[in-house]
Every structure is written in C-alpha cells, then in structure tokens.
Amino acid sequence: MPEKEEKRLLSIPEANQILAKIDMEKADQIQKRTLDYTAKFSKTEADSAKKLRKQLEDEAGLSEEEAVELVNIAPKSVEELRTFTSGWRKLLSTETLEKILKILHKS
C-alpha cells in the first residue's frame, strides 16, 4: 500500500525554507526555479511567516488559506488589503483590516 502524502498549505517563506534544504546538485529544474522564485518573493523569514499565519487565524479570525495569502502578499494599506479580501466570501470590517495590517507589520 503506497504511503499517503501529507498536503498542507505553505507560505512562500516556508516553501523557501524547505527547498533550501535540497541538494541543488541533485535538484530538478522545477525545484531550482521554485527555490529562485521563493527566495525572490519571500516577504519575511519562515519562522515569522508561521507566527504571522497563526496570529492572523487566531486574532483576526482568518482561515488558513486567507492567512497564507496575506503573509505572501504583505499588503501595506487598508485599500490594498481590501483589494485582496474583496474576493473572499466574507466582508471584513475596517477595524479587522486594521488589526490584520498591525499583525502583518509589527515584526
């Protein structure tokens, strides 16, 4: 019986941390390109990203998917944040949006 693969959401910094452990001599082209991408587009360190995700879920009531999206993007203003959250199936109050920004940018 084949092993069941574990699937979980990762932020860009978390993916970068995992890929950085791979021996690049043995890595395939996709792994190399993905590592390059994650290195360029990580907005924070992996440990910070994990803490931010947890805080966004616990303190702002976001789902795991929503928290990962915001950690990856790191919006800087309420207006920018509204652009991303407008596609979600729930409306967030200005107070919640401000709380999210405070969490994202206090580190």
Image (spheres, rainbow, N blue to C red):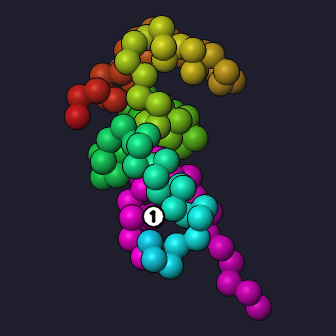
Question: Which image quadrant is residue 106 in?
Answer: top left
Q: Amino acid at mark 1?
A: Leu
Instruction: Look at the image and tell me whether residue 13 can be seen.
Output: no
Q: Residue at x 65, y 24 (%)?
A: 88
Q: Magenta-highlighted stretch: main secondary structure?
A: loop
Instruction: Look at the image and tell me whether residue 100 can be seen.
Output: yes
Q: How many marks?
A: 1
Q: From this viewpoint, which residue is outermost toward the bottom?
A: 1
Magenta stretch? 1-23
Q: From this viewpoint, which residue is outermost toward the right?
A: 1
Q: Residue at x 51, y 62 (%)?
A: 32
Question: Which image quadrant is residue 98 in?
Answer: top left
Residue 24 in the image: above or below residue 92: below
Which quarter of the image is occupied by the N terminus? bottom right
Image spot of residue 80 (x, y percent): 48, 14
Question: Was residue 73 drawn as part of the magenta stretch in this picture?
Answer: no
Q: Residue at x 74, y 87 (%)?
A: 2
Question: Was residue 18 drawn as part of the magenta stretch in this picture?
Answer: yes
Residue 49 in the image: above or below residue 103: below
For mark 1, does the 10 Å Cα neighbourhood hold few (<14), some (14 to 19), or many (20 or more) residues?
Answer: some
Check disc 1 and report its element: helix, strand or loop: helix
Image spot of residue 30 (x, y percent): 60, 61
Q: Residue at x 42, y 56 (%)?
A: 16
Which quarter of the image is occupied by the C terminus? top left
Image spot of residue 83 (x, y percent): 57, 14
Residue 16 in the image: above or below residue 56: below
Is 25 or 31 nearer to us in this picture? 25
Image spot of residue 25 (x, y percent): 45, 77
Residue receiving disc 1: 19
Is 61 or 28 nearer to us in this picture? 28
